[in-house]
């Protein structure tokens, strides 16, 4: 299989999604993602990372509110 035909490994999809969360990505990486990446992979990882982010924010807020209330 040539490099063009290989799908992206999970760590590269994850790195691209994380870079998109903060809005930075190299042009070469973006081109690689569009040529070798499957949209399904990016959508699933994006949804998973969004859920993790929301749960982390929720957890921090619960922790801070609990500390502020003295519990």
Image (cartoon, rainbow, N blue to C red):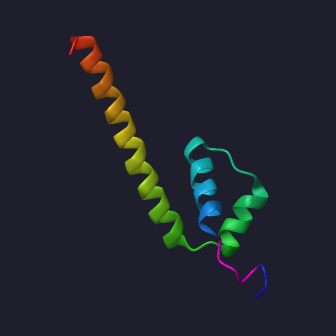
Seen in the picture, residue 4 relative to 63 is either above or below; the reply is below
Q: Position of residue 36 (x, y in %)?
A: 68, 74
Residue displayed at 28% across by 27% down = 62
The magenta stretch spans residue 7 = yes
Locate residue 10 relative to residue 62 in the image: left or right. Answer: right
The residue furthest front is 71
Seen in the picture, residue 32 relative to 57 is either above or below; the reply is below
Quadrant of the image containing the N terminus: bottom right
- Tell me the magenta residue range: 4-8
Q: Position of residue 70 (x, y in %)?
A: 22, 11
Locate residue 43 relative to residue 37 in the image: left or right. Answer: left
Residue displayed at 63% across by 56% down = 16
Which quadrant of the view contains residue 30? bottom right
Of residues 51 and 63, the one nearer the viewer is: 63
The magenta stretch spans residue 43 = no
Seen in the picture, residue 34 relative to 26 is either above or below; the reply is below
Q: Position of residue 60 (x, y in %)?
A: 36, 29
């Amino acid at each position: 299989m040539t490099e063009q035909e290989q799908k992206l490994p999970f760590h590269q999809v994850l790195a691209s999604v994380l870079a998109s969360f903060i809005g930075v990505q190299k042009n070469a990486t973006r081109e690689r993602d569009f040529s070798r990446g499957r949209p399904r992979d990016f959508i699933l990882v994006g949804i998973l990372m969004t859920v993790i982010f929301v749960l982390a924010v929720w957890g921090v807020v619960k922790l801070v509110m609990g500390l502020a209330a003295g519990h």
